[in-house]
Image: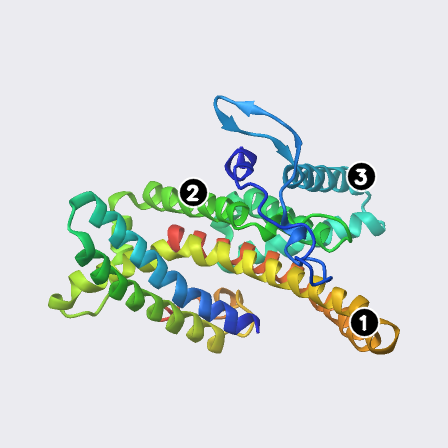
Amino acid sequence: MGQALRLATELVAGVGVGGLIGWALDQLFGTAPFLMVTFLFLGGGAGIMNVVRTAKAMQGEPMPGHHLRNATDDDDED
Amino acid sequence: MISAAYAADDAHGGHGGGGTGLPDPMHQFEIQRLIDLNAFGFDASFTNSALFMVIAAALITLFALFAMRSGALVPGRMQSVAELSYEFVANMVRDNVGTSGMKYFPFIFTLFMFVLVLNMLGMVPYSFTVTSHIIVTFALAAFVFIGVTLIGFWKHGIGFLKFFVPSGVPFVMLPLLVVIEVISYLTRPVSLSVRLFANMMAGHTMLKVFGSFVVALGLLGGWAALAFMVAFTGLEILVAFLQAYVFAILTCIYLNDALHMH
């Protein structure tokens, strides 16, 4: 349950923060709903990216925090 | 300082659950003013939430001072616990940030112990769970986020912006991906705070709901709910520890990103 909740949080946070940024920029430039719509989608993209990254980290390392000790020269993580 | 931020988050919980006879499961999260304070037009009242933060801070300090009072070479029971918690956090920082991160160990240790003790205090009946309020967890997460970003710019100067440019991407895609990376970076404090807050609030609401089932089902059917309550209380203690651990380890990972940029 913890892992599922974590992934769900990542996705919702992406969309939420994206929408918030878009709304704030709309208020700033007075371009009512256009920037908010654009940033909602961008935020969705960021959320999906976060989910994929988190899921990859979950698969690769069941216990986070043991990657530096074993493989220091492994640069292609995340 | 934090107390000023959430004290305005006024009491919204109801009293008793509108005629159904079951107690309101959200009533436990209600903020109550204990001492009314007004600082420069801000409502900075000393609330039950602030009280439990003070209790937590005092407990941690007293525990550390009491456990290490003798400083024996062969530790006693209390000193073992103190040394264990030190080693636990120290290894976490070393594994995730490297030895260069040990400079920030005092902060991570304070953060971990504070969240852990607040979560554990919430498990005591009739107590108040400070971490079940998003404004508290968000203040902690925002502090971590701003601090880590400042460390990143301080270490790498303007070059820290390269953190937002993914490598091996066609040039035309870069503007889009940089925006997405920036949004993804900005979601960190949100997901960090929502995770702790949601876990604590969901758990305590569940406890309360099943607790009221025990009473409502009475002597005949209440035992099943009671058995579940016992198991779920154990799980909640695990969650209380795990969420403090996750909060601290994610702080370490973010710190590692800022220090080493990868």
Q: Is residue B86 left or right of residue B97?
A: right
A58 up-or-down from B142: above or below: below
Label 2 and label 1: CA atoms lie apart by: 45 Å
Mark 1 highlights which residue?
A: B226
Quadrant holding the C terminus of chain A: bottom left
Q: Nearer the viewer, residue A4 or B204?
A: B204
Q: Chain of mark 3?
A: B
Q: Is residue B105 visible?
A: yes
Question: Residue at image x 80%, y 78%?
Answer: B224
Q: Position of residue B138 (x, y in %)?
A: 49, 48
Q: Chain of mark 2?
A: B
**Which residue is at the far right?**
B219
Q: Secondary structure at mark 3?
A: helix
| Mark with earlier residue (3, 2) | 3
Specify the subunit that label 1 lies on.
B
Query: Which of the pair B212/B126 is nearer the observer?
Result: B212
Quick check: A38 left or right of A49? left
Q: Find residue B66 and name its label.
A: 3
Q: Which residue is mark 2?
A: B147
User: Residue lying furthest top in this view?
Assistant: B40
Q: CA distance from mark 1 to mark 3?
A: 37 Å
In percent of width and height, residue B84 lies at 72, 54
The number of numbered badges drawn on the structure is 3
Numbered label attached to residue A23: none
Three-letter code, disc 3: Phe
The correct choice, above or below, for B218 with respect to B7 in the image is: below
In front of the other: label 2 or label 1?
A: 1
Disc 1 or disc 3, which is closer to the eye? 1
